[in-house]
């Protein structure tokens, strides 16, 4: 982690440098006035320059910055101003700042070493002050001063470590959200690919089977049957391949993202017309005046029709009759896909919708879409076949 030069020139940082530098100059002038030696003032001024420079360097290079600040503090510790310690210069505040930055960037063990260096510096400072202690000044004052300095340094280090752990926790949470979003998107891609390609392949196979039934040439019939079987095999291979893109289910929040697919109810009529063939009577009717739907409800309605028609053509032997109806009410839209059971089922005891629900993820995906739109989905057995029904709220009824 590094900082850019522009970050170093932030107004607050520049203001802090100016204020501390001016305060340090005034403090040094006062000490010179009250009897400090010239070399002491110059040495303290040099240490202050080191501390300001360390604060700038520590943004890009925490260890060199901290080491420079520690050197500046060591110089101040060797200077004995009249009546007070040079480590109390205002510019000395940059030392805990460099410790904060280092603790937030380097490994924890390295930051412990930096803390130990700071504590050792406090000990050296107090030992030097002990040797220069004027008569009449009790020694416990140095212990109090050292304790307070240690408390400040330890508090800065602990607060920096806590802030770092919070940042890391935030990054882990963000990474988790990103991973979940990626997983949802992969599952969304898998399902949308399945919805679109599977429907197209199913319609192609159904038309080929219809042509095979109507032809009188045995060889042509066998050839068309082989092509239809190859189409069904391709669909199964597609399902197996797309299973590697994500889990069978996705979080509900992904439904809102999938609903952004630009599909409208105007496409239902074209979908039904494309599925019809001489042996597949697929009809469409719309009853009532259209009312405004949310985007998610409109996509859910389209996918319900697509899944119902696809399952009927895939799992029922022709001739097959499928009716698609959209019935508009004041507060909801009823989407119904009904089949007549066909002439026979490919799997004894199976059903068009039952087979789809038991083997694939189509109905599962439709159910998620409908629920995300605030509606309900049901699959029931009618007199002859199966009925897929979705109830979706209109904007007026929501």
Image (cartoon, grey):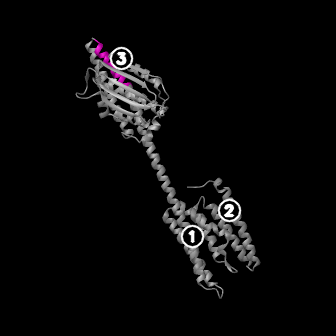
Q: Tell whether 90 sits left or right of 264.
A: right
Find numbered disc 2 in the image and state the secondary structure of the residue it sits on: helix
The residue shown at (39%, 25%) is 200
The residue shown at (25%, 25%) is 346
Q: Tell whether 296 sits left or right of 233.
A: right
Sequence-wise, which precedes: disc 3 or disc 2?
A: 2
Q: What distance separates the C-alpha of mark 2 from that of mark 1?
A: 20 Å
Say few, some or many: other residues with alpha carbon within 10 Å of mark 3 (under 14 / 14 to 19 / 20 or more): some
Please state the horizontal and vertical placement of residue 389, each as a whole percent of the image.
Answer: 36, 29
The residue shown at (36%, 37%) is 243
Which residue is more in the foreground, 56 or 340? Answer: 340
Q: For the residues carrying marks 3 and 2, which lies nearer the camera in this image?
A: 3
Residue 100, compared with residue 234, is above or below; it is below
The reply to whether discs 2 and 1 touch (Cβ–Cβ < 8 Å) is no
- The answer to whether residue 313 of the structure is visible from this angle is no
Residue annotated with mark 2: 16
- The answer to whether residue 21 of the structure is visible from this angle is yes
Please state the horizontal and vertical placement of residue 79, each as a whole percent of the image.
Answer: 67, 77
Please state the horizontal and vertical placement of residue 184, each as a whole percent of the image.
Answer: 43, 41
Specify the principal SS of the magenta part.
helix
Sequence-wise, which precedes: disc 2 or disc 1?
A: 2
Residue annotated with mark 3: 277
Verify whether residue 1 appears in magenta: no
Q: What distance separates the C-alpha of mark 3 from that of mark 1?
A: 83 Å
Find numbered disc 1 in the image and state the secondary structure of the residue it sits on: helix
The reply to whether discs 3 and 1 touch (Cβ–Cβ < 8 Å) is no
Magenta residues span: 200-215
Residue annotated with mark 1: 153
């Amino acid at each position: 982690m590094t900082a850019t030069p522009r970050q170093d020139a932030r107004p607050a940082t520049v203001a802090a440098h100016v204020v501390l530098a001016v305060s340090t100059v005034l403090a040094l002038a006062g000490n010179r006035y009250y009897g400090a030696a010239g070399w002491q003032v110059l040495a303290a001024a040099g240490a202050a320059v080191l501390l300001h420079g360390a604060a700038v360097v520590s943004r890009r290079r925490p260890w060199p910055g901290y080491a420079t600040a520690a050197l500046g503090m060591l110089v101040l510790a060797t200077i004995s101003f009249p009546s007070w310690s040079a480590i109390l210069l205002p510019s000395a505040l940059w030392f805990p700042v460099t410790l904060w930055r280092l603790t937030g960037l380097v490994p924890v063990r390295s930051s412990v070493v930096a803390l130990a260096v700071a504590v050792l510096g406090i000990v050296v400072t107090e030992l030097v002050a002990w040797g220069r202690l004027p008569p009449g000044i009790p020694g416990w004052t140095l212990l109090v001063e050292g304790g307070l300095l240690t408390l400040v340094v330890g508090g800065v280090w602990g607060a920096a470590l806590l802030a770092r752990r919070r940042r890391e926790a935030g990054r882990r949470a963000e990474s988790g959200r990103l991973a979940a979003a990626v997983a949802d998107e992969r599952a969304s891609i898998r399902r949308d690919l399945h919805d679109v390609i599977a429907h197209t392949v199913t319609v192609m196979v159904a038309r080929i089977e219809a042509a095979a039934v109507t032809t009188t040439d045995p060889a042509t019939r066998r050839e068309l049957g082989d092509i239809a079987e190859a189409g069904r095999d391709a669909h199964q291979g597609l399902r197996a391949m797309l299973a590697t893109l994500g889990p069978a289910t996705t979080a509900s929040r992904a439904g809102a993202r999938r609903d952004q697919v630009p599909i409208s109810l105007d496409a239902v009529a074209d979908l039904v017309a494309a599925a019809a063939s001489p042996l597949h009577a697929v009809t469409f009717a719309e009853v009532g005046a259209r009312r405004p739907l949310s985007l998610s409800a409109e996509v859910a309605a389209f996918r319900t029709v697509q899944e119902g028609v696809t399952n009927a053509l895939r799992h029922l032997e022709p001739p097959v009759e499928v009716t698609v109806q959209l019935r508009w009410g004041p507060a909801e839209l009823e989407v119904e896909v009904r089949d007549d059971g066909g002439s026979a089922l490919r799997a004894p005891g199976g059903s068009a919708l039952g087979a789809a629900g038991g083997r694939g993820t189509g109905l599962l995906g439709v159910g998620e879409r409908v629920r995300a739109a605030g509606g309900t989905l049901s699959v029931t057995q009618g007199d002859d076949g199966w009925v897929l029904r979705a109830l979706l709220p209109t904007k007026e009824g929501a």
